[in-house]
Amino acid sequence: MVAANREMAVYCFDTLVAHYNSDDAPPAAFDEGQHPLFVTWKKVVNGSEPRLRGCIGTLEARYLVNGFRDYALTSALRDRRFPPIQAKELPTLECTVSILTNYETANNYLDWEVGTHGLIIEFTDPNNNVRRSATYLPEVAAHEGWTKEEAIDSLMRKAGYSGHITESLRKSIQVTRYQSTLFTLTYSDYVSYVRATRGAAPAINGVKPGNY
């Protein structure tokens, strides 16, 4: 099984740096394969708790090199919840790459473990008969300190449901649980890696070297 690793996170940073420089990223230094994947960008300011800046991926298997290249940019620039990440923010960023595995159909909405499983929920909105779906990665519920029920309710809101949440509606949800491997890399560690492997720190248009 392919596991998330440092080279995948480096490639995501390489891709974003290349975008700001209107250049091509160096070749990926990890093995190809096909897996569902996510790219998450967070921003750390003055040692504070990292704040989400973008998180987008795919629940369908993608070739890893193309997938990480596409979603590194999509999550950084086109997550509709946030303004696009600017080049000057790069020194404050950390990147987490996730590879999703072990998809299983849950017996009910409580048939999963906080901190172990990510969730995909699907249900029919009783107000308009629209089919809704949403996902949380395995680390989300634990990070937020949610119970299983709180995580499910939050997912229903994420899916666009604005009505009253009843127990019968929760029981109607189809839940797919999954697990993931992940790797998180800060920008400073990325710079150290690039210096060690390529002989020089990355140059970024519009960002002074002293800022990273």
Image (cartoon, rainbow, N blue to C red):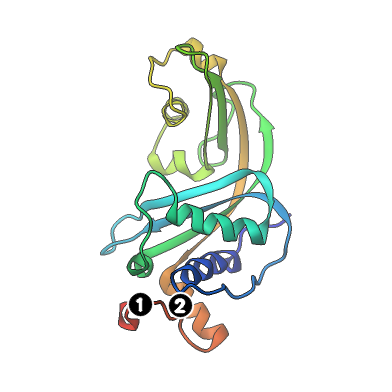
Circle 2 SS class: helix
Q: Residue 115: x percent and y percent?
A: 51, 41
Which disc number belongs to residue 158? none
Separation (CA) of disc 1 from disc 2: 8 Å
Q: Residue at x 56, y 34 (%)?
A: 119
Q: Residue furthest front?
A: 22
Q: Residue furthest bottom?
A: 199
Q: Which residue is mark 1?
A: 212
Please tell me which residue lies in front, 163 or 144.
Answer: 163
Q: Residue at x 68, y 37 (%)?
A: 103
Q: Amino acid at mark 2?
A: Val
Q: Residue 12: x percent and y percent?
A: 53, 64
Q: Which residue is mark 2?
A: 191
Q: Residue 84: x percent and y percent?
A: 38, 55
Q: Amino acid at mark 1?
A: Tyr
Q: Quadrant of residue 212?
A: bottom left
Q: Residue at x 48, y 11 (%)?
A: 126
